[in-house]
Amino acid sequence: MLQKKIINIALDGPSGAGKSTMAKEIAKEFGFIYVDTGAMYRAVGFYALRNNVKPSNKAAVLPLLDSIKIELKFENKTQRIFLNGENVSSAIREHSVSSAASDVSAIPEVRSFLLDLQRSIAEKNSVIMDGRDIGTVILPNADLKLFLTATPEERAKRRYNELMERGQRMDYETVLADMIKRDKNDEHRDHAPLKAAPDAVLLDTTGNSFSDTLALLKRVIKDRLKNVL
Ligand code: DC
């Protein structure tokens, strides 16, 4: 029997561009697993905070890696993340963990610590994997690379609404300032900075509704992958 080809889609872009919302829908539509690599950096950042370690302090973060075991489990194709056996899927969504994740993600040893896990999932499964360096570093041979973006103001508005829905009170100006700071961190770090791969399809979703963006993505995927889907 012919084995169905494993398909890898890389989805990169800045925070709040709508990657995870879109990736979940795409995964459902095409039967892929959605892998959220940001959750892995969040788990490391969360562990640093829990151990009273400043996430930007490389010398203090590195020894922690020896006592971190991260596992992803997929239930109904939805990712759950476990840190040393504990389900931290909700805890890592706290606002304070966002900047901790960004800080630890600038440490090259943290990036290589997570690289094998990310690649091994994509080797065994058809995935849409979201992150910052998936098309450039993790899956350079992905079948399709997408780069999703929107203006900082639009992304901050979306993140603000998300936080409100989860009952986390913050003012919009703070969310916007944090977003701009995190963009700067992610784009200007020395190792695997946020950037579009030269062969990525660039999609700016500013002003688009959820359904416009989803329809656009589905069209791009069906068109680019018509020979393998
Ligand atoms: O996608 P997110 O906002 O949950 O990611 C949290 C942080 O992790 C983000 O500031 C950048 C970092 N990150 C990264 O450097 N590389 C990835 N592949 C995914 C996330």
Image: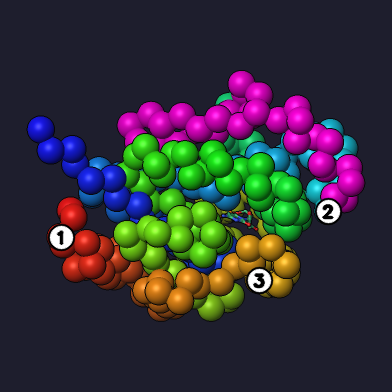
Q: Name the residue under label 2.
A: 56
Residue shown at 15%/60% (left/top)? 227
Q: In this view, does 218 lie above or below 59?
A: below
Residue 187 badge: 3
Counting from the top left corner in percent of width and height, residue 11 is at: 43, 60
Q: Which of marks 1 and 2 is in front?
A: 1
Q: Is residue 46 visible?
A: yes
Q: Earlier in the sequence, mark 3 or mark 2?
A: 2
State the separation of the CA atoms marked 3 and 2.
Answer: 16 Å
Residue type at the position of mark 3 = Glu
Q: Mark 1 points at which residue?
A: 227
Label 2: which secondary element: loop
Label 1: which secondary element: loop
Counting from the top left corner in percent of width and height, residue 97 is at: 70, 47
Counting from the top left corner in percent of width and height, residue 209 is at: 34, 70
State the separation of the CA atoms marked 1 and 2.
Answer: 45 Å
Q: Is residue 140 above or below residue 208?
A: above
Q: In this view, does 66 lie above or below 213?
A: above
Q: Is residue 46 left or right of residue 22?
A: right
18 or 31, nearer to the observer: 31
Counting from the top left corner in percent of width and height, residue 127 is at: 36, 47
State the separation of the CA atoms marked 1 and 3.
Answer: 34 Å
**Dots 3, 2 in contact, CB < 8 A:** no
The quadrant where residue 144 appears: bottom left
Q: Few, some or many C-alpha atoms within 10 Å of disc 3 (few <14, some 14-19, many ≥20)?
A: some
Q: Few, some or many C-alpha atoms within 10 Å of disc 1 (few <14, some 14-19, many ≥20)?
A: few
Q: What stretch is highlighted in magenta?
A: 57-86
Location of ligand 1 given as a quarter of the image? bottom right
Label 3: which secondary element: helix
